[in-house]
């Protein structure tokens, strides 16, 4: 908790850049058939109603779309 309250925001630029790059990779993985397509499968199953359309599934789909084989 102390770190969160006292950290200089300027020192977090690398973390911010890492988050941005990971998000770009994840979204690309949702658009195109890379690797095992786990993220795309979760997204498609949410769209067809096979899986609930909730925040947890969305996060799992985005995170899974970064997985490569």
Image (cartoon, rainbow, N blue to C red):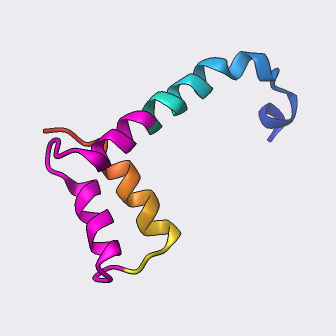
User: Residue at 23% across / 63% down in the picture?
Assistant: 41
Q: Report the front residue among 12 and 30.
A: 30
Q: Report the front residue among 8 and 53.
A: 53
User: Residue at 28% across / 82% down in the picture?
Assistant: 50
Say if 47 sits above or below 62 in the image. Answer: below
- Name the image quarter holding the N terminus: top right
Q: Among all residues in the image, which is located at the extreme right?
A: 6
Q: Main secondary structure of the magenta part?
A: helix
Say if 50 sits above or below 9 in the image. Answer: below
Viewed as shown, does residue 31 lie left or right of 19?
left
Give how far across and how far down residue 45 sits, in percent. 27, 73
Span highlighted in magenta in the image: 24-51
Dividing the picture into quarters, in which one does residue 8 lie? Answer: top right
Viewed as shown, does residue 48 lie left or right of 62?
left
User: Residue at 86% across / 35% down in the picture?
Assistant: 5
Give how far across and how far down residue 42 sits, in percent. 29, 65
- Name the image quarter holding the C terminus: top left
Viewed as shown, does residue 44 lie left or right of 23?
left
Give how far across and how far down residue 33 sits, in percent. 16, 46
User: Residue at 29% across / 55% down in the picture?
Assistant: 39
Dividing the picture into quarters, in which one does residue 12 lie? Answer: top right
Q: Report the front residue among 9 and 37.
A: 37
Q: Is residue 54 magenta?
A: no
């Amino acid at each position: 908790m102390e770190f969160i309250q006292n950290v200089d925001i300027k020192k977090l630029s690398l973390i911010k850049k890492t988050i941005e790059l990971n998000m770009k990779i994840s979204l690309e993985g949702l658009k195109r058939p890379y690797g095992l397509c786990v993220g795309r499968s979760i997204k498609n199953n949410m769209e067809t109603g096979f899986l609930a359309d909730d925040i947890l599934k969305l996060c799992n789909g985005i995170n899974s779309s970064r997985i490569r084989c």
